[in-house]
Image (cartoon, grey):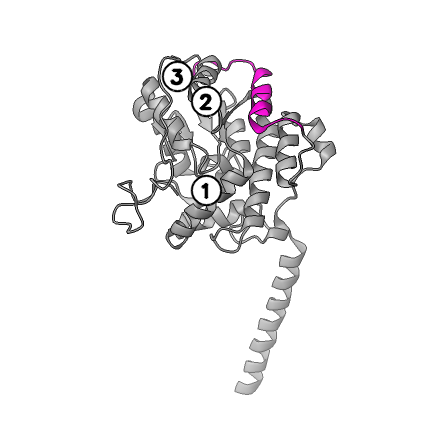
């Protein structure tokens, strides 16, 4: 009798396992899934899609970079300038009347821009990253911009300017939730960005656990938080293409190669700020290293530079 009961239990287990496998195979994995593989990540746009998108000329330059081609005929900085000339001023960004999101990827000058906003009068309302954000709330907000997402909402309440992680991965939901907000994207050429992020991740990869680790795997489509050239190249391309497609008509581009005084003029015009403030550079070289690191660095909080 006991043997018959065991056989029945085992049969039920196999049946449930079979059903689970079929369900998983039939259903698509959620877009926010932290362990999605590169095959689940959308491909970058083709040339025809680029022609129809906002910032088409800038995207052409990006595509020529990724293909090691010189066909675009325009430099990265020239293309960014041309894009910015097509914009209309957003205004109110330095008076605290309008939210400003910097959706630039890490190692593009995100902290420098925060310091500029602090100098312009935003003070503690200018935040480098979402304070105390949680991965479960970020993924809920990405899936639905009306989600409660407590840590995301708390960050919004505290800060009027936000950038870096996890801001850059929430473009679509931010645009829907805050339609009057202004968007800025600090950026840099692909090769220099890859070189900088490779060095950064070599130092930080063992520290990218928990929410930070899940976020990096999700956004760049890798199985681990470690830096992978192909995945991060594709992630860079997708990020720029998505941003320009969604909010290209209200997105100011600030390349690292742009002269500092020009950066301030662009920001002043776009957000109605005081252009007399100097553009300060932060995290240049290896200054993102934490205290006590034997390889250099003279300071920085535990999470700075991630």
Identify the image quadrant of residue 110.
Answer: top left
- Check the image and report above or below for 68 versus 256: below
The Cα atoms of the two marked residues, 1 and 2, are separated by 20 Å
Q: Is residue 74 magenta?
A: yes
User: Is residue 208 in sight in this rendering?
Assistant: no
**Which residue occupies the extreme right position in the image?**
48
Label 1 sits on residue = 196
Q: Position of residue 247 (x, y in %)?
A: 58, 26
Residue 234 percent across, percent down from the top left: 59, 44
Q: Is residue 146 above or below residue 224?
A: above
The residue lying at 46 percent from left, 40 percent from top is 138
**Highlighted magenta segment, given as a residue range:** 73-93
Given residues 76 and 157, the one toward you in this image is: 76
Please name the residue shown 58% across and 23% down the image. 78
Q: Secondary structure at mark 3?
A: loop
Image x and y of residue 128, in percent: 37, 32
Quadrant location of the C terminus?
top left
Q: Residues within 10 Å of mark 2 (few under 14, many from 20)?
A: few
User: Where the N terminus falls, by quadrant?
Assistant: bottom right
Q: Which residue is mark 3?
A: 94
Q: Is residue 78 inside the magenta stretch?
A: yes
Q: Compare marks 3 and 1 and give the one earlier in the sequence.
A: 3
Identify the residue under disc 2.
Answer: 259
- Secondary structure under tag 2 reads loop
């Amino acid at each position: 009798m006991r043997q018959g009961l065991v056989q029945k239990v085992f049969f039920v287990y196999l049946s449930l396992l079979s059903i689970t496998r079929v369900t998983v195979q039939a259903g698509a994995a959620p877009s926010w899934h932290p362990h999605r593989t590169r095959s689940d990540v959308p491909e970058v746009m083709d040339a025809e899609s680029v022609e129809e998108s906002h910032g088409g000329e800038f995207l052409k330059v990006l595509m020529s970079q990724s293909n090691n081609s010189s066909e675009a005929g325009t430099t990265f900085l020239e293309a960014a300038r041309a894009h910015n000339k097509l914009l209309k001023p957003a205004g109110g960004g330095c008076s605290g009347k309008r939210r400003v999101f910097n959706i630039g990827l890490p190692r593009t000058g995100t902290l420098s821009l925060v310091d500029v906003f602090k100098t312009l009068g935003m003070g503690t309302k200018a935040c480098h990253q979402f304070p105390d954000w949680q991965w479960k709330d970020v993924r809920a907000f990405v899936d639905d911009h009306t989600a409660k997402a407590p840590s995301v909402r708390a960050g919004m309440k505290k800060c009027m300017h936000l950038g870096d992680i996890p801001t850059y991965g929430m473009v679509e939901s931010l645009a829907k939730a805050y339609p009057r907000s202004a968007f800025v994207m600090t950026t840099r050429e692909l090769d220099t960005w890859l070189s900088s992020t490779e060095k950064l991740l070599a130092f930080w990869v063992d520290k990218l656990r928990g929410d930070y680790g899940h976020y990096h795997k999700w956004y760049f489509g890798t199985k681990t938080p470690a830096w992978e050239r192909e995945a991060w190249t594709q992630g860079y391309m997708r990020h720029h293409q998505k941003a320009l497609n969604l909010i290209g008509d209200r997105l100011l581009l600030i390349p690292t190669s742009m002269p500092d005084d020009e950066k301030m003029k662009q920001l002043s015009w776009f957000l109605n700020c005081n252009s007399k403030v100097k553009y300060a550079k932060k995290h240049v070289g290896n200054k993102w290293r934490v205290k006590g690191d034997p390889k250099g660095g003279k300071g920085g909080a535990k999470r700075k530079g991630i």
